[in-house]
């Protein structure tokens, strides 16, 4: 509990980052394990995109580190993918209202600091390996995604729909896109990457 939000995880990397130059197009991906494991050659080669995912995190933890891991790095765009671990009660019981409040706070912090906002949908899960829909029922995922989509529209943020793109039969994550029922495999990330890029491009065009 000494570093519950894991502020130390990226402290050294953040300090070593040079200030962005004009035209760099720096983008921060803020999220949990689905962002955290999206690294290496498949993570937007040639782009000034920075991964600040931490596995297992909830929106409350991300909100605490948002200033250090997003605002202080002065990106043009932040892509926020968060909420699945809240739904699963990873760090205690969460209501949808609490998740919505935390997402709202991150988006508002970005906006007042001149950072364009992309809000991503929660991704689906399946029960092929573990009974994941017990902790992450599709109806809860739908409810949160509906709110994220509506909030993004009302606030003129960009909504990034990963959910529908990864969906297979029975309202679950398509088997071809994951090796454990929750985290995308290379095929899953190959679907997500162009969607994310289009969302970033749209955000950069927003006034």
Image (tube, grey):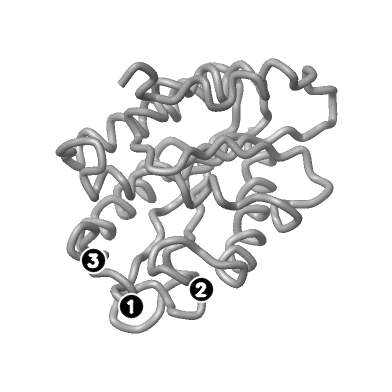
Residue 207, compared with residue 135, is above or below; it is: above
Q: Secondary structure at mark 2?
A: helix
Q: Residue at x 36, y 46 (%)?
A: 148
Q: Earlier in the sequence, mark 1 or mark 2?
A: 1
How far across and how far down the image is residue 178, in percent?
48, 71
User: What residue is disc 3 on?
Assistant: 133
Task: Give the camera-side residue of 113 and 64.
Answer: 64
Q: Callout 3: helix, strand or loop?
A: helix
Given residues 21 and 36, the one toward you in this image is 36
- Residue 188 figure quarter: bottom right
Q: Is residue 10 left or right of residue 141?
A: right
**Rendering coords of residue 19 (x, y %):** 78, 17
Instruction: Say which label, 1 or 3, has the lower sequence index.
Output: 1
Mark drawn on residue 177: 2
Front label number (1 vs 2): 1
Work out how far the residue at label 1 is from the one at label 3, CA to CA, in angstroms.
10 Å
Secondary structure beneath label 1: loop
Quarter the N terminus occupies: top left
Left or right of 182: which side holds 88? left
Q: Residue furthest bottom?
A: 169
Residue 192 vs residue 142: left or right? right
Q: Quick one: 169 or 116, which is closer to the camera?
A: 169
Labels 1 and 2 touching (C-beta < 8 A): no
State the image quarter where residue 64 is shown: top left
Q: Position of residue 5 (x, y in %)?
A: 39, 24
Q: Which residue is mark 1?
A: 128
- Left or right, 37 with respect to 65, comes to right
The residue located at (73%, 33%) in the rendering is: 26
Alpha carbon distance from label 1 to label 2: 12 Å
Q: Residue at x 48, y 61 (%)?
A: 162
Q: Is residue 23 shown above or below 42?
A: above
Numbered badge on residue 1: none
């Amino acid at each position: 509990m000494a570093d519950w939000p894991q502020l130390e995880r990226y402290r050294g990397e953040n300090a070593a980052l040079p200030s962005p130059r004009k035209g760099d197009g720096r983008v921060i991906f803020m999220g949990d394990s689905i962002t955290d494991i999206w690294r290496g050659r498949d993570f937007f080669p040639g782009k000034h995109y920075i991964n600040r995912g931490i596995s297992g995190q909830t929106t409350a933890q991300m909100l605490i580190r948002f200033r250090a891991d997003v605002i202080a790095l002065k990106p043009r765009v932040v892509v926020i993918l968060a909420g699945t671990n809240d739904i699963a009660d990873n760090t205690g019981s969460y209501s949808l209202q609490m998740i919505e409040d935390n997402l709202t706070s991150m988006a508002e912090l970005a906006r007042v600091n001149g950072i364009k906002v992309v809000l991503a949908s929660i991704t689906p899960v399946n029960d092929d390996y573990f009974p994941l829909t017990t902790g992450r029922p599709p109806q809860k995922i739908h409810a949160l995604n509906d709110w994220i989509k509506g909030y993004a529209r009302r606030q003129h943020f960009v909504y990034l729909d990963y959910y529908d793109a990864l969906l297979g039969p029975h309202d679950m994550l398509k088997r071809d896109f994951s090796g454990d029922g929750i985290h995308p495999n290379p095929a899953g990330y190959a679907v997500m990457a162009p969607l994310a890029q289009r969302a970033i491009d749209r955000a950069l065009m927003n006034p």
